[in-house]
């Protein structure tokens, strides 16, 4: 049976993506035209922008497919869409747009006219030396979070959705506020939310009709940011999306809250304050997607829940309105790696697909760095100390920690964070700062040559720097002559797998919990493993921790490896977005073990 990457549901134009005559798809349809997607976005027009493996972009429009080229082979960081416009954000902080005309939501592009034929750079940010870190689209207003926490916006401001007072609309990006950490908006939304650094409050600006800002008044418009009255701390927000009629928020613990119009907010009443949805209290939600009139939530158990208008992009008595969340049965989910499921909503369309953007290695190291709990060295000024991990950082950069500290002692904290963000999870928004730092160290190797994957592979091969041992019990054959020998019976034998302690801390929740319970005065440099896995399977797992790859040789028994490691993701508490299960599925397919 063919394993499809993408399924689509909802309103479609004839022959667009799916070879099917008719406008409504009430059942999930497999799409054979798109393979190995990282992300898919769609707008009003019968078109879709697809980000594929190997930094490729495809623009699908009705029956045509165009390959799009990025200048200087820049690496894609994200893609997004709204109405008749697409945006492409690159790793170096540049922003490009793709549109069918000079649309009101497209920021100024100089003398060039927008078209669906090529990507055009939004030069305002480049000309003003601004590195864009993320983009949120609100329909007629767009938001751009730049390095340093500067939040810009462009587009319409008729109800305060730019958050800059009662000023006219602007195609030129305008600075809204600084020191911003995250921002949120959504389909046809006339508002935006944001959080600030070192602040646990949630802020919002724009239209508060039906309490959509989560503010305890109705029908108001706020032309400048206000503090949202909620008990939810900003550090607890996993995601927040808003559209024409509702705002939905999920927390890091998986709780789901909403506010806005009755029948759309998942409650049986209109709400002007973020309120937990009763039907989802027993579920842990890990992913949120909204269309203009519908909401979808994915749980950690890979169950899909949704509510809103089911069938059309406009309210109509011809189509069913689900007022409260209901489980959506999708038998196709078992064909997609559960760790890689992504959901995305167009205005009146829903995609569910197997995302190949499985970067668990970088994600794990980002969380590991931000945690700061297990750092064993400090970097930065006395006013701002940043915890780092000595063995990792020395190998990553290629010199001693003292030399690294000396090169950074006069740098501003933002520049130090730029270096560390590159070192831990390869996020680069200012290449000049990175190049200047490496030049100051006078190293022969350049940043682009020293990738995270290369560094960790070298560490895997470097036995001398490994500082921790996993002891794997050897199962000995029973000897009838030793039945009465209690001393031999209790004498367990172990084989040793050497590893770096920071690798276990970064990749495995099981080992993090283990090390967290060790007192400061206690030194722990080995642990006995009683997982009942063979040493061959554990060696495959440990190498996966370094390389993000499950590698089998001719000496391995695929059936045994799959059986032993199938429960490893749960037992060793791997990142839920890990590629581990996905790669096991590929092995099953290759050796017909399904």
Image (cartoon, grey):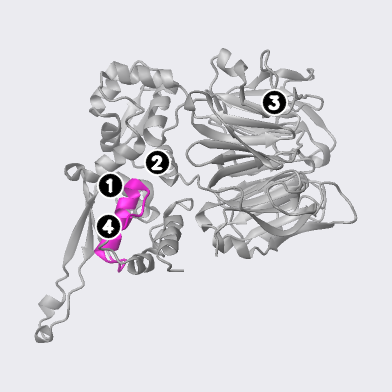
Under circle 2, the secondary element is helix
* Highlighted range, magenta: 530-553
Q: Nearer the viewer, mark 4 or mark 1?
A: 4
Q: Residue 512 carries which label?
A: none
Mark positioned earlier in the residue sequence (4 or 3): 3
Mark positioned earlier in the residue sequence (3 or 1): 3
Give me the residue at 82% from left, 41% from top. 210
Give me the residue at 56% from left, 16% from top. 126
Residue 397 horizontal/vertical position (percent)? 29, 29
Q: Which residue lies furthest to the front in this view?
A: 63
Q: Residue 365 carries which label?
A: 2
Mark positioned earlier in the residue sequence (2 or 3): 3
Which residue in the structure is indicated by mark 4?
539
Query: Which picture quadrant has residue 298?
Result: bottom right
Q: Nearer the viewer, mark 4 or mark 3?
A: 3
Residue 130 horizontal/vertical position (percent)? 55, 18
User: Can residue 301 be seen in this snapshot?
Assistant: no
Mark pair 3, 1: CA separation: 52 Å
Is-magenta flag for residue 534? yes
Mark pair 2, 3: CA separation: 39 Å
Which residue in the structure is indicated by mark 1?
501
Which residue in the structure is indicated by mark 3?
115
Under circle 3, the secondary element is loop
Mark pair 2, 4: CA separation: 21 Å
Q: Which of 97 and 398 is in front in this view?
A: 97
Under circle 1, the secondary element is helix
Q: Which of 38 and 235 is in front in this view?
A: 38
Q: Nearer the viewer, mark 2 or mark 1?
A: 2
Mark positioned earlier in the residue sequence (4 or 1): 1
């Amino acid at each position: 049976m063919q394993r499809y990457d993408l399924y689509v549901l909802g309103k479609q134009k004839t022959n667009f993506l799916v070879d099917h005559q008719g406008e409504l798809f009430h059942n999930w349809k497999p799409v054979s035209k798109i393979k190995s997607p990282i992300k898919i976005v769609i707008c009003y027009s019968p078109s879709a922008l697809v980000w594929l493996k190997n930094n490729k972009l495809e623009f699908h429009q009705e029956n045509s497919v165009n390959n799009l080229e990025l200048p200087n082979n820049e690496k894609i960081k994200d893609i997004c869409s709204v109405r008749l416009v697409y945006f492409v954000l690159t790793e170096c902080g540049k922003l490009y747009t793709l549109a069918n005309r000079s649309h009101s939501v497209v920021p100024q592009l100089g003398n060039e006219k927008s078209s669906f034929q090529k990507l055009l750079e939004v030069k305002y940010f480049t000309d003003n030396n601004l590195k864009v870190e993320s983009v949120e689209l609100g329909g007629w207003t767009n938001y751009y979070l730049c390095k340093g926490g500067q939040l810009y916006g462009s587009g319409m401001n008729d109800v305060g959705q730019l958050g800059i007072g009662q000023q006219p609309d602007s195609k030129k990006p305008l600075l809204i506020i600084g020191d911003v950490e995250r921002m949120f908006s959504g389909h046809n939304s006339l508002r935006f939310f944001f959080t600030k650094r070192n602040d646990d409050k949630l802020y919002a600006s724009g239209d508060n009709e039906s309490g959509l800002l989560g503010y305890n008044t109705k029908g108001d418009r706020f032309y400048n940011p206000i503090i949202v009255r909620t008990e939810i701390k900003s550090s607890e927000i996993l995601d927040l999306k808003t559209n024409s009629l509702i705002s939905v928020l999920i927390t890091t613990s998986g709780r789901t809250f909403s506010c806005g119009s009755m029948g759309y907010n998942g409650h049986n009443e209109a709400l002007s304050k973020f309120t937990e949805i009763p039907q989802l209290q027993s579920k842990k939600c890990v992913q949120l997607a909204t269309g203009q009139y519908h909401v979808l939530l994915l749980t950690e158990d890979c169950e899909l829940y949704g509510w809103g208008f089911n069938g059309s992009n406009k309210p109509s008595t011809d189509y069913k309105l689900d007022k409260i969340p209901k489980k959506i049965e999708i038998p196709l989910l078992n064909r997609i790696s559960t760790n890689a499921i992504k959901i995305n909503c167009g205005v009146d369309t829903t995609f569910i697909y197997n995302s190949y953007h499985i970067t668990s290695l970088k994600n794990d190291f980002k969380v590991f760095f931000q945690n700061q709990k297990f750092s064993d060295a400090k970097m930065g000024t006395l006013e701002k100390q940043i915890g780092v991990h000595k063995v990792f950082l020395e190998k990553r950069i290629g010199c001693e920690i003292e030399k690294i500290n000396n090169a950074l002692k006069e740098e501003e904290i933002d520049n130090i964070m730029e270096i560390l963000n590159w070192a831990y999870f390869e996020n680069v928004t200012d290449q000049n700062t990175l190049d200047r730092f490496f030049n100051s160290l006078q190293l022969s190797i350049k940043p682009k040559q020293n990738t995270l994957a290369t560094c960790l592979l070298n560490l895997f091969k470097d036995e001398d720097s490994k500082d921790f041992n996993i002891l794997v019990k050897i199962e000995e054959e029973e000897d009838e002559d030793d039945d009465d020998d209690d001393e031999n019976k209790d004498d367990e034998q172990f084989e040793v797998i050497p590893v770096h302690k920071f690798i276990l801390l970064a990749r495995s929740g099981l080992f993090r919990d283990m090390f967290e319970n060790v007192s400061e005065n206690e030194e722990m440099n080995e642990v006995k493993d009683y997982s009942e896995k063979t040493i061959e399977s554990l060696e495959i797992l440990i190498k996966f921790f370094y390389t993000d790859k499950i590698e089998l040789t001719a000496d391995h028994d695929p059936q045994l490896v799959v059986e032993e490691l199938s429960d490893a993701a749960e037992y060793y508490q791997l990142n839920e977005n890990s590629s581990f299960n996905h790669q096991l599925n590929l092995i099953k397919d290759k050796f017909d073990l399904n």
